[in-house]
Image (cartoon, helix red, strand yellow):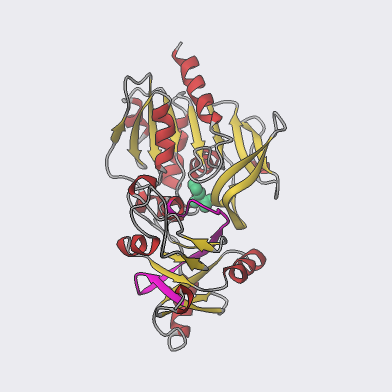
Amino acid sequence: MSLLERGDNAYLLLADGTIFEGLHFGVKGTAIGEVVFTTGMTAYQETLTDPSYYGQLVTQTFPLIGNYGVNAADSESARSYIHGYIVREWCNTPSNFRMEGDIDGFLKEQNIVGIYNIDTRKLTRIIREVGVMNGVITTEDVYAKKEELLEQVRNYTIQNAILSVTGDEPRTYREGTPKYKVALYDFGYKRNIRNELVKRGCEVVVLPAATSAEELKAMHVDGIMLSNGPGDPSENQAIIDNVGEIAKLGIPIFGICLGHQLLALSQGCRTEKLKYGHRGANQPVIDLNSHRTYVTSQNHGYAVVGESLDPEVGTVSHINANDKTCEGIRYHKINAFTVQFHPEAHGGPLDTAYLFDEFVAVMEKEKK
Ligand SMILES: NC(=O)CC[C@H](N)C(=O)O
């Protein structure tokens, strides 16, 4: 019997009432979330462990997932925060010299409900046409419980996102004799952001999201990294106010994704929800200064409204080549630059890793 014919039933019910019938992998149960798609053809483990996916049901547009297995080294955080996983087909005979297990085992270990053998192309087309919507994966009889589930699905919102994923105490990482000390604000950070900094001679102190500007000041850091993270950026007023205070310290700042959005909000910008977001490893981004286009890794559902940026405060430095939304800002009055995409990749191309070099160069200049 092929993998596609085997196993217990699972269902995906969307907020608009559409039902997909599939089979279950991972754990059994019922999981509600916002259904989003990612177009990354590889790096499923990095996707599963990127805390920015907190509260979402993630579907992969690539039809075969799991063929190179999973391992401890490739996780982007200590655990997975996604609510559910949706694929066309998963591979139960993975093969790779680095593998330590398979995707089904990984989902079971992480307590994640998965569904496979559904038409993920059809699902993606619905999301692209209608926009991101909530849904539920269940291994129970969806037809018997449809109305009850629909009510829960329609009332679902991602809440307390940052506080659900941030660490509870500062942690320091270094290699050899570091030259710079960087505070990494953990809004749900991906490990490779930390690694890219450590690799460039930084001692990285990962800080809980609520660490105040005053506490930070006492640490005498050379630079501040504002991390990626989950949820609607505008729903974090206390953190946005704190980021505004942090920006006043005069310490060089580099922000990625949620960090970019939070800094922009603190500087008077607005954010908006995109129809279906940018998630994948081949998003084209134009650097408006050099006119070069970079292929970038992305995972976001919201964006800073470029027009809401006061020209005295900053300039939009990058835009998305597809929908022209804001992908980066250079600030004039504070020593900061931020990007909506992921220069740390994992997965995806390393085209924009040079931004970490730029951040180090800014810190070096400030030191002198
Ligand atoms: N990767 C991120 O930092 C995502 C930021 C934010 N949660 C969004 O969806 O837009």
Q: Nearer the viewer, residue 345 or 147?
A: 345
Residue 285 in percent (x, y) is at 65, 41
Task: Read off the magenta span.
Answer: 23-45
Image check: 116 left or right of 281?
left
The residue located at (68%, 42%) in the rendering is: 307
Tally of numbered discs: 0
Residue 41 in percent (x, y) is at 55, 54
The residue located at (47%, 84%) in the rendering is: 146
Query: Is residue 367 visible in this depiction of the protein?
Result: yes
Image check: 80 left or right of 59?
left
Quarter of the image where the N terminus is located? bottom left
Image check: 81 left or right of 5?
left
Residue 359 in percent (x, y) is at 50, 26
Q: Is residue 228 magenta?
A: no
- 252 w.r.t. 69: above or below: above
- 202 w.r.t. 94: above or below: above
Query: Residue 296 sits in which quadrant?
Result: top right
Q: Nearer the viewer, residue 302 or 7?
A: 7
Residue 304 in percent (x, y) is at 60, 45
Q: Residue furthest bottom?
A: 144
Query: Is residue 234 visible in this depiction of the protein?
Result: no
The residue located at (35%, 53%) in the rendering is: 164
Query: Residue 81 sits in which quadrant?
Result: bottom left
Image check: 351 left or right of 221?
right
Q: Is residue 41 magenta?
A: yes
Q: Residue furthest right?
A: 291
Q: Nearer the viewer, residue 36 or 105?
A: 105
